Image (cartoon, rainbow, N blue to C red):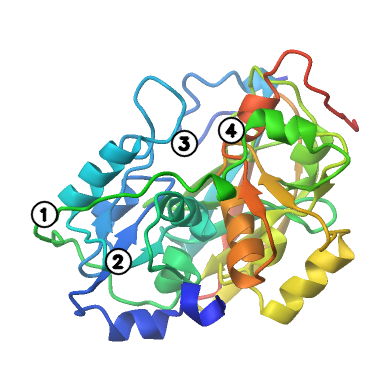
Amino acid sequence: MSRADVLVDADWAEAHLDDPKIVFVEVDEDVSAYDGGHIKGAVRLDWTKELQQPAVRDVIDRDDFSKLLSAKGIGNDDTVVLYGGNNNWFAAYAYWYFKLYGHQDVKLLDGGRKKWELDGRELVKDDAGRAATNYVAKDQDLSIRAYRDEVIASIGSKNLVDVRSPDEFSGKIKAPAHLPQEQSQKAGHVPTAINIPWSKAAADDGTFRSDEELAKLYGQEGFDDSKSTIAYCRIGERSSHTWFVLAELLGKNDVKNYDGSWVEYGSLIGAPVVKDV
Amino acid sequence: MCGAPVQGLSLEGIDVGKESIIQGTVSKAGSAVGGAYVRLLDGTGEFTAEVVTSATGAFRFFAAPGDWTLRTLAPGTSVDTAVTAVQGDVVETSVEVPA
């Protein structure tokens, strides 16, 4: 696995817009962004309605994921290229999700929607019009998914990488600063977690930094290559971005995303929390 | 507190007294710039949040009291603007990007 296997740039994407075996998939925090214009041929995945169970806070199950991808016209042997706004947070989450259900060939569009827009590349409003498929998802690959008990058991032993902003890590604020701050959970972070904000891995235009810059970044911030790793954030999207960097770009061993993240952890009775401010 | 006049985006349903809001508009040669990217950097220059401006050029952050930098990205340009957020207040900021 290397950068070229998991990441494509905008020029590559533009050259492959009409390739029937490549499916562009937009996953945005702002699910309405697609309607205002999207990459030609792209289908939309709505993380609020399609990637979450309606009543339970969890990923949808294997059968529902199979049905969802079938309805979107995505085949098991298609190359899926994910992109989105917000520096690919939700696209990275979808990447992790596709890997969780065993999709073979998934890539991220470097820079996502932001770079595409800042470059002034074409966005269209046409429907993708892909024919339904018969997608069959695999069982969840739990080697990339961490649950709350594993996080608590990993205090002091694994790399716990808190990828939120420094103010969220310290407990000064409880949510990213574009969202209201009133939340039920406690503020702070998991004891022994190191704070390496996801944003350090990306340039202003949303593209990932080079492998050399990334390796240097995590080395400087106290990431221990000899340990297994769990990344978390608030709801599991920004940590997917860092999971992608660590597992897919840098090829670190045994990296899991804790998709429950702070919204779950910070609400647990008795779970240890460090608050700096 | 809550002394600032409410402008731009609606604050309906938001308890302004508990928030430290930074909001404003991005314009170019007097016209609103929609689809610009506004990044909120903390006092150390670290990225904290990013939003895309609305069709009317509007943006908003729920920050914490203190000093922040707004970094506005539009095609071909990047503009930094210093702002100070105050709890219970709505700080209105106008960002002008070069034409």
Residue B38: % across, % down: 57, 56
- Tag 1 secondary structure: loop
User: Given the image, on which type of amino acid does mark 4 rest?
Assistant: Gly
Above or below: residue A64 compared with residue A83: above
Tell which residue pokes out farthest to the front in this image.
Answer: A139
Badge 4 is on which residue? Answer: A260
Chain letter of disc 2 in the image: A
Q: Mark 2, mark 4: which one is toward the viewer?
A: 4
Q: CA distance from mark 1 to mark 2?
A: 15 Å
Residue A29: % across, % down: 44, 46
Q: Image point 87% across, 29% down: which residue?
A: A275
Badge 3 is on which residue? Answer: B9
Can the viewer see residue A16?
yes
Residue A38: % across, % down: 28, 63
N-terminal of the pair, mark 1 or mark 2, is: 2
Q: Image point 72% across, 63% down: which residue?
A: A200
Badge 2 is on which residue? Answer: A24
Chain letter of disc 4 in the image: A
Q: Are marks 1 and 3 in contact (CB under 8 Å)?
A: no
